[in-house]
Image (tube, coloured by chain):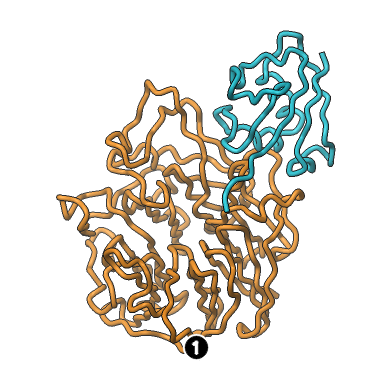
Amino acid sequence: MAYLVLIGTRKGLFTARSDDRRHWSVDGPAKLDDDGFTAVAEIYAAACDPATGRVLVGASTFFGPSIWHSDDHATTWSEPENAPMAFPQDLPYRPLDFSDTAGIDQPDSEQTNTVKRIWQLTFGPGQRVWAGVEPTSLWTSDDGGRTFTFNQALWDHPQHTTWASGAGGPAVHTIVPDPTDPRHLTVAISSGGIYQTHDDGQTWEGITAGITVDYAPDEAPESGQCIHKVTRDADGTLFAQSHGPAYRATKPDGGWTNISTNLPSNFGFAIVAHPHEAGTVMAWPVGESMDRTPPGHRIGAWRTTDGGDTWHPWGTGLPAEPYYGTVMRDGACTDGAEQPGWYFGTRCGDVWAADDQTGQWHLVATHLPDVLCVRAMETP
Amino acid sequence: MIIDVKLPAALASECGGARHLDIDVPAEATLTDVLDQIAAAHPRLGRRLRDEAGKLRRYVNIYVGDDESRRLQGLDTPVDGHDIQILPSIAGG
């Protein structure tokens, strides 16, 4: 078995390949387009479908955002002739910035909504692909990621008046399918909250209540919280890393439990569940307050095997010297293998991989542009 | 009226490697009319230049004759027989 890692950076897509998850060969930046301008594109989103081998990459370029796909394990790339997604132009303009009109539709505005950046691509059951987009919107594809349909119901959710922009932009940045129920989906928004559908996106329920904030007078709002990432473990338990503590929701309607008491900080972006072991989750905390670097200036992953009640630093082989690169919200993943590998990349352009069994981190790539997303899968 | 549209190398593959396009438009045509024709014949090139609202992308500059269209009447600028040159401004460090 071999392994493929897609590394999306601030300047292009890099690929890494290995037969043993220890020794890696790295290529890039990839020229997704024939002219090569995607070599400097921001790559926020990548996705792998082990069932078909298809990989998708969302690139934001000087010439607008688009989605490329490859069916030969990221060797050659194709892009649809027509735009994979386009906002309905009859929608009123919705500013999603830091202004006092954020989240409030402006029917008299001459501006319109347009796709700015593709933040998330996720394969669901069957041929379904979901895309999370800036401005805050969700899209569905049933042709493998070539054309997408706008999800009106989430856009129209009454809580949209509480949505605004995080520092990186307003987006649906997390999409969590349910492998047992193709009509069930969880999405997360910065800033905005967490939403679930049980009817394939026709209706949405906000499930953010219980996640507190320390940056607004109302510490316990119903919605509008800045959620950084959500992951789902093998039993269906959701784990959320907020702009503050990490949380566990054993039942989505049963509220959230703060699980950061054992972590070195109350802040972070990336959180990833083990693909097969319920209650096992990895997090990459970031120093809270004004020190947005790894806690103690030491890069490291923290692991729980009891659903977040206790955490411990996990793995060996990471730098012992001070390290200042954070792991962004999509900068970590597993490859989903039976004996999974864990992967993460940092804003210093370093990427590591470790076998779940050994916990030994091996450098996949170094000195890349800052890493925005990492996705991996087994290949034949 | 045939308008000569010069393309940058970064977009040439969208037209089979061509660096020029001859666009046939009425005498009273505007820049929008030219871009509409380009988009109809080469959809991917069209969306590289304008977003779904029909607005010129931020880093795409289009010169009508010697003047950048944003300093004229934007996409409503009459082309008036002038050559058109598309120049991306590749910004950032």
Residue B63 on image: x %, y %: 69, 26
Q: Residue at x 71, y 23 (%)?
A: B66
Occupied quadrant, residue B53 = top right
Front-most of B93 and B39?
A: B93
Residue A180 on image: x %, y %: 45, 64
Front-most of A339 and A102?
A: A102
Q: Residue at x 74, y 44 (%)?
A: B10
Whether residue A300 appears in this view of the structure is no
Residue under circle 1? A317
Q: Residue at x 37, y 80 (%)?
A: A302
Q: Which chain is cyan?
A: B
Front-most of A33 and B66?
A: B66
- Give the colour in which the image draws chain A: orange
Occupied quadrant, residue A238 = bottom left
Q: Secondary structure at mark 1?
A: loop
Q: Is residue A196 above or below residue A321?
A: above
The amino acid beneath tag 1 is: Gly
In the displayed image of the protein, which residue is found farthest to the top? B28
Which chain's residue wears label 1? A
Q: Is residue A254 above or below residue A107?
A: below
Residue A255 on image: x %, y %: 22, 61
In the displayed image of the protein, which residue is found farthest to the front? B66
> Counting other residues with Cα less than 10 Å from the Cα at mark 1, is it few (<14), some (14-19), or many (20 or more)?
few
